[in-house]
Amino acid sequence: MVAVGALAPAVVGLAWVVSQSVASPLRADAPPEPLVVPVATVARDQPVSVLLTVEHSAPFQAVVAGAGVVTDLHVGAGDEVGPGDKLVSIDDQVRIAFAAPAPLWRDIGLGAEGEDVERVRDFLAALDLPAGTVPGRATAATVEGIRQLNQSLGRGSGDRVLHRETLLWIGPEPMPVSRLLVEIGEVLAAGQAVMEGPSRPVTVTAETPQPRSWPEAEYVLAVGDVEVPYDPRTGRVHDPESTAAIAEALGGDEGGGTVKLAAPEEVGTLRASAVVTDPAGRTCVFESVSAPPTPIEVTGGSLSTVEVPADWAGRPVLANPREVREDLSCG
């Protein structure tokens, strides 16, 4: 007991020495050091959330160019038809599907020129038939492809004219058949619809939660991984391929999307603590503890970071001026 009692003062003394040598976590032992960091760069695409609505056309109808009696039906509801597929026979002559941006409005023979000839050339190429090499002109090679097509349809081996009545326009892409509109034995008039496809998305409308102005730039509309060109001044997408892609990505007639810059802009970014606003309302940064103030334009940011013009990238700034400087005036 005497020994223990004798040790107690020594233990207490040692504890006091240790307590004096270990810094308290609540008390700073040294003044803060200046922290100088470079302005970083980041790419910003300025995303804006929008509500999308898809508008559809009336159901697409394939119509015949000539009159006659339906003698055979080669497809049924639920089938998908593409370029060259047999659709219906009228007066025992087969009519086939013509997939193109626009229908054929005349017969095409040797020497014909125009945009419709180019559609025919694309059609023949899709069927692996000779199409010719001169854009927009029906050459000898083009009419050879037409001859081979007519021969395959039972029109003889010498017919080198593509007859408008041979084709039923199904639109620019393969068409799913929703329903047939005629029966075998029915008498048809020119221009009568024989089958119907589904309605197609024709317009996508984008609405922002609040009205806003759009700086002059190129934008895209994005839904998931799908991005299409977008003009925020119109608020709509009309291009058939773009409209179809957005509608498919939405999976319905309504949903959310994002409008953003097509080419992200680079901006400088730095800690918000580095930027000082003095009582006069001037904004500046300091390159060091002793450096004079440098005016700066803040273009955006958040509570923790600010964005500045891209030409600030790499410049050194003092990240903690309020802790290491006495003079915080920007004048």
Image: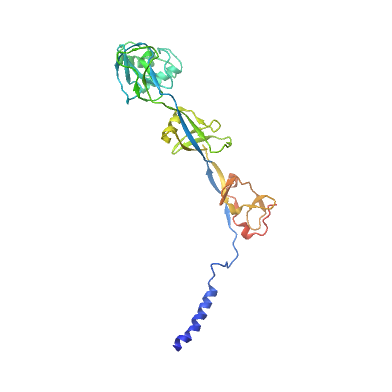
Left or right of residue 331: residue 133: left
Q: What is the x, y in percent for residue 214?
A: 57, 36
Residue at 62 percent of width and 60 percent of height: 324
Q: How is the image coloured?
A: rainbow
Quarter occupied by residue 4: bottom left
In the image, is residue 118 above or below residue 230?
above
Left or right of residue 160: residue 291: right
Q: Is residue 150 visible?
A: yes
Residue at 51 percent of width and 80 percent of height: 12
Between 133 and 49, the one lying in front of the other is 49
In the image, is residue 52 above or below residue 298?
above
Quarter occupied by residue 129: top left
Q: What is the x, y in percent for residue 123?
A: 38, 21
In the image, is residue 18 above or below residue 279?
below
Q: Is residue 128 visible?
A: no
In the image, is residue 183 above or below residue 32?
above
Q: What is the x, y in percent for residue 84?
A: 34, 20
Residue at 44 percent of width and 88 percent of height: 1
- Residue furthest out toward the bottom: 2
Left or right of residue 60: residue 15: right
Between 100 and 48, the one lying in front of the other is 48
| Total numbered badges shown on the rendered structure | 0
Q: What is the x, y in percent for residue 269?
A: 56, 48
